[in-house]
């Protein structure tokens, strides 16, 4: 296992609902690293915009005002007794709220605003300064930590991802339809991939995995092997 002086950065990127957060969280807890869900930060900024009316009911953004508000948006992560982390927005626990469809439907255009990205990327880089971190997102291996020792790119079909998210939301008691979820997944893929600023793409040195047909246990095992290779220097 890694010691404090050889702690690395693990960057896990991929499409929405590809299971990358589950992979990242479980790896971090096994190896004793900090886990950061960078998507939660974009979601928190979006929730702030919705709550303050800077994003209206039609998801139209007052970009200038939202950018001006960035210095007053404080995002933190609070560790929970079960090892997970909750996202705090100006001190308020918003972990549950930021996962709702209201935020999911509004977040991609917010994440496409260059000034929002610059502010959040700077925060993410600060969180990784001491290394020993697993961060997941869309641009972690390309923009946030281009020097990460281990980069993973996770993919799965849109249908598989929509099915997973649908199941997750139904289990939480949400009233949603599979068709709406699939439409949201496809729409977000499109925005994430085609935005000008840091579009979602696989870093040249990232290891790709399609987990459509894998169980969580198989995924965990695969990722642990990659981590051990990266930390022992025996990459092949
Ligand atoms: O992973 P997620 O669904 O929670 O991400 C929410 C949104 O934020 C999604 O539209 C992609 C965007 N995002 C991003 O642009 N860059 C990141 N590093 C993480 C998320």
Image (spheres, rainbow, N blue to C red):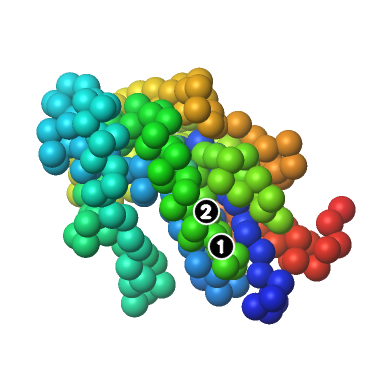
Q: Is residue 112 above or below residue 126?
A: above
Residue situated in front as seen by the camera: 216 or 122: 122
Query: Image check: 41 left or right of 234?
Result: left
The residue at the point 48 percent across, 53 percent down is 124
Residue situated in front as seen by the camera: 111 or 178: 111
Q: Tag on residue 129? A: 1
The residue at the point 57 percent across, 67 percent down is 130
Query: Image check: 89 left or right of 20?
Result: left
Q: Position of residue 210 (x, y in %)?
A: 63, 40
The residue at the point 55 percent across, 74 percent down is 32
Give the Cα distance between marks 2 and 1.
6 Å
Q: Is residue 46 above or below residue 12?
A: above
Q: Is residue 45 above or below residue 75?
A: above
Residue 234: quadrant of the picture: bottom right
Mark 2 lies on a secondary structure that is helix
Question: Ligand 1 is found in which quarter of the picture?
Answer: top left
Q: Position of residue 105 (x, y in %)?
A: 28, 31
User: Is residue 188 in view from this perspective?
Assistant: yes
Q: Position of residue 82 (x, y in %)?
A: 37, 74
User: Is residue 167 in view from this perspective?
Assistant: no
Is the residue marked by circle 2 packed among few (<14), some (14-19), or many (20+) residues within 10 Å?
A: some
Residue situated in front as seen by the camera: 167 or 209: 209
Q: Tag on residue 125? A: 2
Is the residue marked by circle 1 packed among few (<14), some (14-19), or many (20+) residues within 10 Å?
A: few
Q: Tag on residue 67? A: none
Residue 211: quadrant of the picture: top right
The CB of the residue at mark 1 lies under 8 Å from ligand 1: no
Q: Position of residue 19 (x, y in %)?
A: 50, 47
Q: Are marks 2 and 1 in contact (CB under 8 Å)?
A: yes
Q: How many marks?
A: 2
Mark 1 lies on a secondary structure that is loop
The residue at the point 34 percent across, 77 percent down is 81
């Amino acid at each position: 296992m890694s010691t404090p002086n050889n702690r690395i950065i693990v960057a896990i990127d991929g499409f929405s609902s590809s299971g990358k957060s589950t992979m990242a969280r479980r790896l971090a807890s096994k190896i004793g690293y900090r886990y950061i869900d960078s998507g939660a930060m974009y979601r928190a900024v979006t929730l702030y915009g919705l709550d303050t009316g800077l994003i209206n009911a039609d998801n139209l953004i007052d970009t200038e005002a939202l950018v001006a508000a960035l210095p007053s948006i404080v995002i933190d992560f609070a560790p929970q007794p079960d090892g997970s982390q909750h996202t705090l927005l100006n001190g308020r626990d918003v972990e549950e709220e930021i996962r709702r469809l209201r935020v999911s439907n509004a977040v991609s255009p917010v994440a496409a605003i260059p000034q929002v990205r610059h502010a959040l990327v700077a925060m993410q880089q600060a969180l990784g300064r001491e290394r020993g971190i697993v961060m997941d997102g869309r641009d972690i291996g390309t923009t946030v930590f281009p020097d990460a020792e281990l980069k993973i790119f996770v993919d799965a079909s849109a249908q598989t991802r929509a099915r997973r998210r649908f199941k997750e939301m139904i289990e939480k008691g949400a009233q949603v339809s599979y068709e709406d979820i699939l439409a949201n997944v496809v729409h977000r893929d499109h925005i994430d991939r085609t935005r000008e600023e840091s579009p979602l793409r696989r870093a040249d040195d990232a290891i790709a995995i399609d987990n459509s047909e894998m169980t969580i246990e198989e995924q965990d095992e695969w990722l642990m092997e990659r981590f051990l290779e990266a930390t022992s220097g025996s990459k092949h």
